[in-house]
Amino acid sequence: MKKIYLAIPLLILGCTEPNFNYPESEKKSLSYSAHGETINDPYLYMEDCQNLEVIEWANNQNEFTNNYLEGSEYNELYEQIKEAYSSEYYSMSFFDDESNFYYYNSGNSQHNKYIKKDSNEIILDPDTWSTDQTLNLANVSTSPDEKFLAYTVSDGGVDWRTIYVIDLETMEELATPVTEVKFSSIDWSQDSKGFYYNKYPKPEEKNRLCEPSLNAAIYYFDISTGKSSLFYGEQNPEENYSLSFVGEDNIPLIRVINGSEEENHYIIKKDDVWELATPKNVASFNYQDSDTEGLFFLTNFEAANYRLVKVLFTGEILEIIPEKALALKSVSILEDFIITNSINTDMNSFIEFYSKDGELLNHKIPNNIQGTFSSFSMHKEKLRFSVSNFINPTRYIDLDLDTLDYTIVWQDKVSNFNPSDYKKTFTYYESKDGTMVPLTYFHRKDLVIDAETPIFLYGYGGYNISIRPSFSRKYVGWLELGGIVAIANLRGGGELGKEWHNAGRLKEKQNVFDDFLYASKYLEASEIGNRKSTVISGRSNGGLLVGTSLVQNPNYFGATLPAVGVLDMLRFTEFTEGWGWRGDYGSPLLSKEDFDFNFDISPYHQLTEGECYSPTLVTTGRRDDRVVPSHSYKFTARIQEFQGCNNPVMLIDTVRAGHGSGGGAAMPKWKRIELFTSEQAFALKNLKKY
């Protein structure tokens, strides 16, 4: 099969081109103080999130980058990725007799349509809301009596949401939308007269995309009056909440979260008084279900790999399913049994069945169905679930637990990707300190792999988030053209339990960067590509991973793609949710100790003038109000200023797009296709042989 790099003429000549004439980045005499030190920051003004001067600069960077990317690499990848996104989609609810609504996409729509099943009437069609399809549907919630539908809209990908309500009998929209909603579900009252949601104070418009997200509260919206009233909150500026209702009496239960820290607690309302339902902020608790005796929680309380407990209404904690060697990631409490979903040693789901009393049952899932499982339910005496892995798109499966016979209810068919043409390899490799780290790589079976094969290496490594096997159509073009995709499960994630997370956060964060570098070293030593045929990629916390890997190993990789990254590790606390990232990063402007270790890993601050850095494409979303785009702006300006060789360093600032890229709430399909094409085309233009 033709290798990617053979399709790129004059590849080596990238190092001998004239210096790039980058758009000018103005330097200003700006600084700030921290712990008695003055930090000079000539690009500090780029933190003004709606500064017209900065927007013009970003527009110039976009034009410069787009001109550079024009060519055969872009065109060929674009057609492959576009085709991969053209498959038909049905949500699982379409196949559920008890569900009256479902999502559908013919493959030609930018967003999924929300449809009423009995009449096949389109209730919501986000494609029609704006000419560029950047008013995005985030989530929907139907009232218990199915008279009303509430849905949230993101304007250009921001975390801010607006809730609209439709009367499903008349199909008329209520006159009063609900605004200032963020990080919120829609929880209806049992009488269908209103719903609860998370509300934040309204910021000044000029600060809307960068002001710290503080003082959340739960409000109740009354359908009949169109007015909201405070239900709970405004007591601790750093708390955020999610609401559940327990039992037949619909007793309110609130999860209280402090930023992104895992440690949390629940409070429950008894006789109009809020009481603690779990220990307070000493572990992670995740509410699952209830019975007449108490509440079921998935927790790492006294169990680093998690367990299922029942907290009795008396306060006593009973263990239902104990901690085991594998990290328990989720449970499904069905009518007759409990299903546990752990991460196996090969990163696939490991499924077990238990009685309601915690006794291990003999049920199992056939060994030939592997990947990440979700959405368990019973359907006509069969177990229904969803499964996906790196080389098999999503399937909905009905399984007879007695015979282990199963039928595929629906499967995602990607027209230009045949799973049988692919193979994946799972292994462990040794990191710098001897720790064994999981790695999966996959490619076409007919690919001739050698030391020059192009590698797309992805990592995350943070916030106890686990990178599970799942199909991503963004990689189809890269794979079909003869590349390898590799996924490293770095420390800082949750794949191997809470201890794995702890080994990659705060003062231990360097372990994550070492793990990523040594994934590349392992592949190169195995003659699976080489460092110069490898592009490294990561998003958000993974953008930090890529940025730091770049500055700690200048001109090591063939290309680097830091996306929506946390790149200034001193000032991230000053914007939106940044104050809440202390669980992984600490608080550098408040703690000298945190300042010191963050300075050492901060991509923006560790850039060195005159150093030769690998070809780099920084990407961000102009309306990203989670990791604000100034991280990417400042980093781009400084690396362009400091670059000591002719390797390109460029920026794509996606207009009217937010933090995410995988789903429709952040950006429409056409923007995702363009973004993924641009990243991979940049890589192909720069990967080179020794």
Image (cartoon, rainbow, N blue to C red):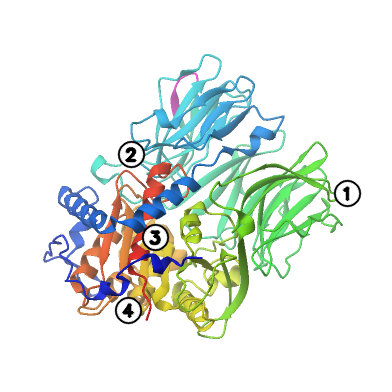
Q: Position of residue 232 (x, y in %)?
A: 50, 40
Q: Which label sits in the foreground, 1 or 3?
A: 3
Instruction: Give the residue at mark 3.
Output: 680
Q: CA distance from mark 1 to mark 2?
A: 56 Å
Q: CA distance from mark 1 to mark 3?
A: 46 Å
Instruction: Give the residue at mark 2.
Output: 202
**Lower sequence index among marks 1 and 2:** 2
- Vertical order, 209 against 439 (above or below): above
Question: Circle 3: is it few (<14), some (14-19), or many (20+) Cα within 10 Å?
Answer: many
Q: Which label sits in the foreground, 2 or 3?
A: 3
Query: Identity of the amino acid at label 3?
Result: Gln
Residue at x-position 17% and y-position 71%: 19
**Lower sequence index among marks 4 and 2:** 2
**Lower sequence index among marks 4 and 1:** 1
Question: Circle 4: is it few (<14), some (14-19), or many (20+) Cα within 10 Å?
Answer: some
Kindly state the secondary structure of the residue where label 4 is placed: loop
Q: CA distance from mark 2 to mark 3?
A: 39 Å
Q: Are marks 1 and 3 in contact (CB under 8 Å)?
A: no
Residue 400 visible? The answer is yes
Residue 586 visible? The answer is no
Q: Position of residue 138 (x, y in %)?
A: 47, 39
Q: Is residue 633 left or right of residue 456?
A: left
Instruction: Give the residue at mark 4.
Output: 554
- Vertical order, 500 against 192 (above or below): below
The magenta stretch spans which residues?
A: 223-228
Query: Identity of the amino acid at label 2?
Result: Lys
Q: Say which mark, if any, is on residue 402.
A: 1
Q: Position of residue 545 (x, y in %)?
A: 41, 69
The quadrant holding residue 446 is: bottom right
Is 273 included in the stretch rendered in magenta? no
Q: Position of residue 198 (x, y in %)?
A: 47, 40
